[in-house]
Amino acid sequence: MVNVTLSIPIELKEKMDSFAEINWSAVAREAFDEKITALEFIKKFKAKSTFTEEDALRLGRELNKNLVKKRLS
């Protein structure tokens, strides 16, 4: 296994220290693994998709219009 050094805010470190029984390395490994799994899924999904950036923008505009209508009604 290799070592990785992380920088975190002091406030977070203080909160982590209040749970000394937790193996924070294991928590980080699990979080990294979950994130990588999600990114791999997205990458695979995108590779098979024919959805274009133009489609995404059109859908986003449509969604925004519908949200505004819903809020105003």
Image (cartoon, rainbow, N blue to C red):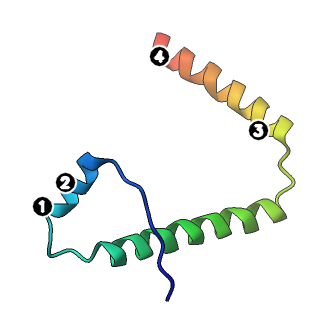
Can the viewer see residue 73? no
Compute the Cα span from label 1 to label 2: 7 Å
Residue 50 in picture, x, y percent from top left: 87, 54
Q: Nearer the viewer, residue 6 or 66?
A: 6
Task: Name the amino acid, label 2.
Answer: Glu
Residue depicted at 27% across the width and 48% down the height:
10
Q: Nearer the viewer, mark 3 or mark 4?
A: 3
Q: Name the residue tied to disc 2.
A: 14
Q: Name the residue tied to disc 1.
A: 18
For the residues bearing labels 2 and 3, Cβ distance under 8 angstroms: no
Q: In the picture provided, is 8 more to the left or to the right than 38?
A: left
Residue 61 in picture, x, y percent from top left: 71, 25
Q: Name the residue tied to disc 4.
A: 71
- Where is 38 relative to 51, above or below? below
Assign a secondary structure to mark 2.
helix
Q: In the picture provided, is 55 more to the left or to the right than 11?
A: right
Of mark 2 and mark 3, the one earlier in the sequence is 2
Task: Name the amino acid, label 4.
Answer: Arg
For the residues bearing labels 4 and 2, Cβ distance under 8 angstroms: no
Q: Name the residue tied to disc 3.
A: 56
Of mark 4 and mark 2, the one earlier in the sequence is 2
Compute the Cα span from label 1 to label 4: 43 Å
Of mark 3 and mark 4, the one earlier in the sequence is 3
Task: Name the amino acid, label 3.
Answer: Ala
Quarter residue 23 falls in: bottom left
Q: Nearer the viewer, mark 4 or mark 2?
A: 2
For the residues bearing labels 1 and 2, Cβ distance under 8 angstroms: yes
Residue depicted at 30% across the width and 72% down the height:
24
- Where is 51 relative to 6, above or below? above
